[in-house]
Image (cartoon, coloured by chain):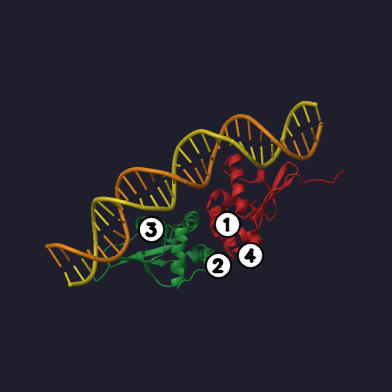
Chain colours: A green, B red, C orange, D yellow
Amino acid sequence: MPRPLTAARTVEHPDVSEVSLQQVMEALADPVRRAVVSQLAGRGEDMTCGSFVTPVSVSTLTHHFNTLREAGVIRQYYVGTAKMNALRADEIEGRFPGLLSAVVAAAGTETRAGTT
Amino acid sequence: MPRPLTAARTVEHPDVSEVSLQQVMEALADPVRRAVVSQLAGRGEDMTCGSFVTPVSVSTLTHHFNTLREAGVIRQYYVGTAKMNALRADEIEGRFPGLLSAVVAAAGTETRAGTT
DNA sequence: GGATTACTTTGATCAGCGTCGTAGGATGGA
DNA sequence: TCCATCCTACGACGCTGATCAAAGTAATCC
């Protein structure tokens, strides 16, 4: 029965109104997490956990995704065996105007690597 | 000879072009340092090290000032026995547009305490 | 059902950072 | 000269957080 086509496991997310500036700043202060955010912003579409380019192990990356999710920066959902990641750009923008975009922009000017 | 009216001890400062986003983010990720920056921004004028309101000891505060200075966020100079602190707002703004102002604004919306 | 893919959890390690108290150096005033 | 004020330097300490490997769970595919 192909009823539950997808979506079995669910993921908890905070409301942006519940996240503190401290959480967001801490989340964005880590270079790996900033790389994740940058790639998400640069790509412009949701990405699976496995499709990010980072210098750390998979288990470490899971930890970073958790941190970003708990800080309200990303939204995660399952699609089959894969876990997708979406930037909560608009929501964070509403909570802390200009913050996320400034960080993404700043990261872009420093990296200047191909967002191929 | 009232020549050296002030200025005996000097302080080293990085050029903003030398500071990394990582440094700035780390500097602004600490709540005490953010409080320092907020008070500096809110006051609108340079402040002595001793005039900040924080929950930490003086020696700890010195450490935070060093971190902020090395990140290019503040500029320090001596005036007599006092050490003044100035926000390098414009310079940081040029290096990472919108970042510092967004953080200061965000901190303001959260604190909402009197910057009396 | 069994193998495969995809991510998580656990447990451990290890470095770094924030914190403090105390002692020290520098300036300014009496 | 002596003292008071300001800030810094020096250990020391505890804790958090980033990291990994290995084992575990969950969905998919053949």
Q: Position of residue C28 (x, y in %)?
A: 79, 39
Which mark identifies residue B94?
4
Q: Secondary structure at mark 1?
A: helix
Q: Nearer the viewer, mark 1 or mark 2?
A: 2
For image coordinates 40% across by 67% down, the residue present is A86
Callouts 3 and 2 close, C-beta under 8 Å: no
Q: Secondary structure at mark 3?
A: helix
Q: Amino acid at mark 3?
A: Leu
Which mark identifies residue A109?
2
Chain for disc number 3: A
Callouts 1 and 4 close, C-beta under 8 Å: no
Q: Nearer the viewer, mark 1 or mark 4?
A: 4
Q: CA distance from mark 4 to mark 2?
A: 12 Å
Which of the marked residues, 1 or 4, is nearer the chain's N terminus? 4
- What is the quadrant of residue A45 in the picture? bottom left
Q: CA distance from mark 3 to mark 2?
A: 24 Å
Does C19 sit left or right of B48 as displayed?
left
Q: Amino acid at mark 2?
A: Thr
Q: Nearer the viewer, mark 3 or mark 1?
A: 3
Callouts 3 and 1 close, C-beta under 8 Å: no
Q: Amino acid at mark 4?
A: Gly
Q: Position of residue B34 (x, y in %)?
A: 57, 52
Q: Position of residue B55 (x, y in %)?
A: 56, 43
Q: CA distance from mark 3 to mark 1?
A: 32 Å
Which mark identifies residue A61?
3
